[in-house]
Amino acid sequence: MPGRVVPVGGPLNDSVQVRSADGGEAVGSGAADGSAEVLVSVADAEQVARLRLPAPVWDFIAGGSGAELTARANLAAFDDIYLVPRVMRGARACDPAAMLIGCEAALPVAVAPIAYQRMIHPDGEVALAAACAKARVPYTIAMLSSMTLEEIAQAGGCLWLQLYWLRDRGVVTELVRRAEAVGCRALVLTVDVPELGRRLRDLRNAFTVPDGVYPANLTHRDLGGGTGPAGPTAPGQSAVASHTAALFDPSLSWSDVAWLAGQTSVPLVLKGILDADDARHAADLGVAGIVVSNHGGRQLDGAVPSITALPWIVDAVAGRCEVFLDSGVRSGLDVLKAVALGANGVMLGRPALWGLALGGAAGAGSILALLTEELRQAMTLAGCPDLSAARALRAMQRLGLLGGPAAT
Ligand SMILES: Cc1cc2nc3c(=O)[nH]c(=O)nc-3n(C[C@H](O)[C@H](O)[C@H](O)COP(=O)(O)O)c2cc1C
């Protein structure tokens, strides 16, 4: 039976009680006002986070670009996929362990790069990174994080650093050096933001990042002396969009990717690829991985859902690099669907933030525990003792067979 969600609207660092899907032991801590909030799905956490966060911050997180066609389609496309379970394979337990760009992970999940996490909880990136270290999943530090990568690295665990391509290449290479110094295990270059998508909610809210939250990895000089994402705005403007326009270099090309790869021995992953030719090109350049992503529907509205594009990319790279998927992952079942369609792993976006909003590291940990439990059960019911069995599952869309091996 689904759990009862009681909105309490308390301060952001309150914790909530989260029970595992089988109703067993609580994986979170009690609500600050003593009320029982029982969350048995990621969707429950979304509802509570929405009640707790200030409306403009909620809109910044939840929103997509334009009419939010792609943001909605990401979810619908996952719902449209069905798995063909296997039976009687004699397995007593499932092991979802994965190797993701050389990191041993407890499950095929990494947390996606997300800017300005102190907007969501005062402990921000350090809390989410600590939850990931505890759950043994990689955490991607956003270039625009609101704590420095050195502070975040204190959390331990497997860390990746995300980069945007900035007009000042020196700033990018300086960040690469700092990532090497703290032991980041991958660089994730986001390639789908020549400029920020038109996010109508932020334009309506004249969104600016709240006081005291700023891109901690960048100096005032890096920001060109400007006010950054907290700058003043008028209705119809977003400070985040203006800041991006000032900082980002829209002319990023394949030769820049080759140049960046030549600057470091840390494995390079490209995030934001949806086209098979682009994926082939990336594999030809020798990247370690690709993230099939439409940025959670925040860039080109009308872009194809990532899960729809995934089989094209898997075919195109033919095992030459790892393939990740993000945009629309909302459950352990979604993780299994992505693996069945050929992904090595997924990146978790908004759900990690909902967990952070519920209760810092404990809240984020609860979301990761829920996903782990959901994935374990989905693998059990689909007859998959491990991820190689999961990759061999047949998947169907309403219209026919998708990905996986041909039926024998
Ligand atoms: C609030 C927010 C901030 C984000 N910031 C970044 C960022 O700084 N760098 C980046 O590459 N992607 C960023 N993303 C995109 C995520 O990495 C990821 O692609 C997306 O959230 C996946 O979609 P999902 O949230 O529907 O799962 C952001 C997404 C959100 C919701």
Image (cartoon, rainbow, N blue to C red):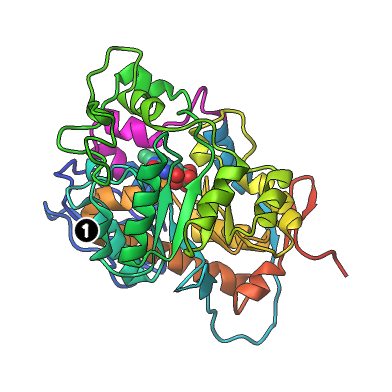
Mark 1 crowdedness (10 Å alpha carbons): few <14, some 14-19, many ≥20: few
Q: At which x and y percent is residue 271?
A: 53, 48
Q: Quadrant of the N terminus?
A: bottom left
Q: At which x and y percent is residue 376?
A: 51, 71
Looking at the image, residue 279 sits to the left or right of residue 54; the answer is right
Ligand 1 under 8 Å from disc 1 Cβ: no
Is residue 50 a member of the stretch shown in magenta? yes
Q: Residue furthest left?
A: 33
Q: At which x and y percent is residue 151?
A: 21, 58
Residue type, mark 1 in image: Glu
The image quadrant where one finds ligand 1 is top left
Q: At which x and y percent is residue 155?
A: 25, 66
Is residue 4 a member of the stretch shown in magenta? no
Q: SS for tag 1?
A: helix
Residue plotted at (27% across, 12% down): 234
> Circle 1 sits on which residue?
151
Magenta segment, which residues?
A: 48-69
Q: Quadrant of the C terminus?
A: bottom right
Residue plotted at (13% across, 55% down): 34
Tell me which corner region of the image, top left, top right, bottom left or bottom right, holds residue 166: top left
